[in-house]
Image (cartoon, grey):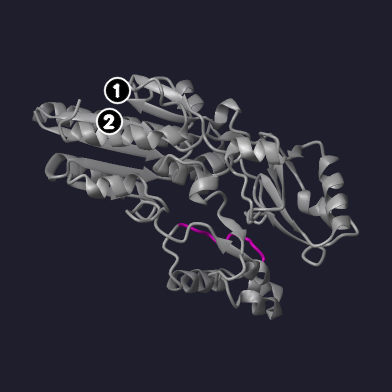
Amino acid sequence: MRRRLAVLLVDALGYELAARTPGFADALPHRRPLETVLGFSSGALPTLFTGRPPCEHGRWLMYRRAQPGVRSPFAGFRWLGALPPRLRRSWKLSRLLTRLVERRGVRGYFDLYEVPRELLEEFDLAERDDIFAPGGLPGGSFWDAVARSGLRWRAWNWRTPELEALAAAERALAEGPEDFVFCYTADLDAALHREGSGGAGVRERLARYDGWLRAVAAAAAARGEELRLVLLSDHGMVDVRESVDVMGTLARLSSRWPQDYLAFFDSTFARFWWRSDEARREVRAALQGLGAGHWLGDDELERAGVRFPAREYGDDVFLLDPGVLMVPSFMGARPLAGMHGYDPAHPDMAALLACDHEVPAGVRRLADVRAFLEDELAWLRGGR
């Protein structure tokens, strides 16, 4: 009997969301929560693919501080500060700058969001290469193992719209020669941000994934094939219950950015690079007084696998409490219904692993997934 493997990686499909959805993915009864990493997909996906924490593979958050001697893809952008504010915020300029960054060799996923254009030169992108391709991550990844395996394979990622990717993957299983197909989609992540976990679009997408899994399983059975199905995610999503104006709080202080410190405001993180001790003391006291988050100490960063000696992701990092959203931030000025990037210990942050076959007991964290998937490749080649 021919062996085949299909992996569906759904961004933000949390274990708890799957468990709360009646009948979801019943074809995959072997499931468990996976401990995700502190942060977003920019750190979670490389951890899943490499089996190593962010401090080892180097990718944590989308933006990091530009380092001396390393040319930033935003080099020369400082002049944008001379443009009128309305032009700096224009969609046409954003599109032009995005294309320029791509022409400078960035092949990974990024978005300019609402990062002040005149400050972009202070930063760098962690994901310059394609993490979904062999050679895309330092020290090797699951994709390098796939390339060495000798198997016939095909993969789809964020570059292909979800419906198109799912249809193509289903056709490959029905008609193609591939032993292994892989499909990644971020559509559910976007729907959860817009609607929260109870949204109609969220339910629609969950039904879509469930239908796809059932359809490919039934078709494989009809062909007499042994198809293994794996459903994965990189993190979950927390429903937003309140917002906090971190940037507004800082604007009332005597210390100002970017003169007295450089800052980057993610949706749930505020990160700082200090130019004076006075600014550090004032800012730390002000944010601690919000009662909506806490400063991450070196011990907590170490335990989370995100302590970087060069401090390229921040001299100090302030993390909001689960369910609290920073509005405005460099990621956007409008409230959202759902967000991730919180303490991984929150139940709704847990990622999901679901299979139609037994999963080894030791697969408990996102970092365990690479070895699990490589064992699946070994099974494809005739192993146990």
Q: Quadrant of the N terminus?
A: top left
Q: Nearer the viewer, residue 269 or 16?
A: 269
Read off the magenta span: 109-116
As measured in the structure, the alpha-carbon distance from the residue carrying label 2 to the one carrying label 1 is 9 Å
Give the label on residue 277, or none. Answer: none
Residue found 25% across the figure and 50% down from its top: 147
Q: Nearer the viewer, residue 209 or 275?
A: 275
- Name which quarter of the figure residue 4 lies in: top left
Give the label on residue 229, or none. Answer: 2
The x and y percentages for residue 251 are 84, 57
The x and y percentages for residue 91 are 56, 68
Q: Up-down: is 57 above or below 30?
A: below
Residue bearing the label numbered 1 = 27
Residue found 82% across the figure and 41% down from its top: 288
Mark 2 and 1 residues: CB-CB less than 8 Å, in contact? Answer: yes
The x and y percentages for residue 26 are 33, 21
Q: Nearer the viewer, residue 369 or 330?
A: 369
- Name which quarter of the figure residue 22 lies in: top left
Q: What secondary structure prevails in the magenta region?
A: loop
Residue found 44% across the figure and 32% down from its top: 203
The x and y percentages for residue 53 are 51, 41
User: Position of 136 compared to 337: left or right?
Assistant: left
> Looking at this rendering, what residue extends furthest in the right direction?
254
Which of disc 1 and disc 2 is earlier in sequence?
A: 1
Residue 295, visible in the rendered structure:
yes
